[in-house]
Amino acid sequence: MADTTVPQSPITASPDVKHIEPSERPGAIGRRDFLLIATGAFAAVGVAGMLWPFIDQMNPDASALALASIDVDISTVEPGQALTIMWRGMPVFIRHRTEAEVAAAREVPVEELGDPLARNANLDPEAPATDENRAAADRPEWLIQVGVCTHLGCVPLGQQGDFGGWFCPCHGSHYDTAGRIRRGPAPQNLPIPPLAFISDTNIRIG
Ligand code: FES
């Protein structure tokens, strides 16, 4: 079969950055540090997703999803800030954690967690929910996770809640600085998507 790889341009913080105001949708990211890069992400995913069904008519949906990866430039995200991008129609939180946020997450015993599993697509499904298993490999300051509450699917608010991580206002779920559910009705930690650092300042998600 011919090579069907579609070149994808890295997503940068401009000119596709859009600030989202709280009034635009319930549970949206309203803090100044949270940016939504939607247009570029959709463009990169869309090209791959559109071409594949013509090549693989047997199972177009699964195949299109398998190709949907995006590259994100994180060079402008300072410690304490976060970026939100869209991937496969879902928000993905990319947080550059401070040393204090990492330390707070690492001092919590796994036995105290509501969900003991890391929920990290890059690890064994049974991997425990230590902060080491939640953070990006060998880059503890970076936490990248799907921003969809595991209760009923709202988008949690960043750098809020009782544990300084995320807070879902829909029904009051609190996630810590490792994205682990600590209080409220959500049953699971926020999921970590497949990801890899392709350079010091660029990550590939998907
Ligand atoms: Fe988040 Fe219910 S959807 S707490």
Image: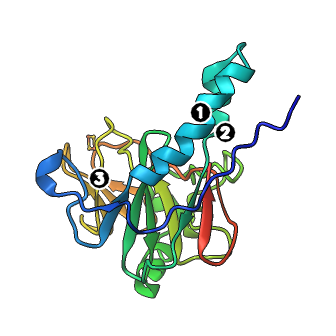
Q: Where is residue 10 in the image (x, y as percent from the top left)?
A: 58, 62
Q: Which of marks 3 and 2 is in front?
A: 2
Q: Tell me whether circle 1 and circle 3 mark residues in contact (CB < 8 Å).
A: no
Q: Identify residue for label 2.
A: 67
Quadrant location, ligand no. 1 = top left
The tag earlier along the polypeptide, 2 or 1, is 1
- Hey, which residue is sitting farthest left in the picture? 23
Q: Where is residue 186 in the image (x, y as percent from the top left)?
A: 34, 43
Q: Tell me whether circle 3 and circle 2 mark residues in contact (CB < 8 Å).
A: no
Label 1 Cα crowd, 10 Å radius (few <14 / some 14-19 / many 20+): many
Q: Where is residue 134 in the image (x, y as percent from the top left)?
A: 56, 62
Q: What element carries label 2?
A: helix
Q: Which amino acid does label 1 sit on?
A: Gly
Q: Identify residue for label 3.
A: 156
- Please give the name of the residue rendered at 50% of the width and 67% of the height, measured from the top-left corner: 143
- Please give the name of the residue rendered at 33% of the width and 38% of the height, measured from the top-left corner: 153
Q: Which amino acid does label 2 sit on?
A: Leu
Q: Which of marks 2 and 1 is in front?
A: 1
Side of 120 where 30 appears, left or right:
left
Q: Which of 64 and 189 is in front in this view?
A: 64
Q: Is mark 3 on a helix, strand or loop?
A: loop
Q: Is residue 135 above or below residue 48?
A: below
Determine if the C-beta at disc 3 is less than 8 A from ligand 1.
yes
Q: Tell me whether circle 2 and circle 1 mark residues in contact (CB < 8 Å).
A: yes
Q: Nearer the viewer, residue 3 or 111?
A: 3
Q: In this view, does 148 lie above or below 34?
A: above
- Please give the name of the residue rendered at 15% of the width and 48% of the height, measured from the top-left corner: 24
Q: Nearer the viewer, residue 65 or 38?
A: 38
Side of 6 where 109 appears, left or right:
left
The tag earlier along the polypeptide, 3 or 2, is 2
Q: Identify residue for label 1.
A: 49
The tag earlier along the polypeptide, 1 or 3, is 1
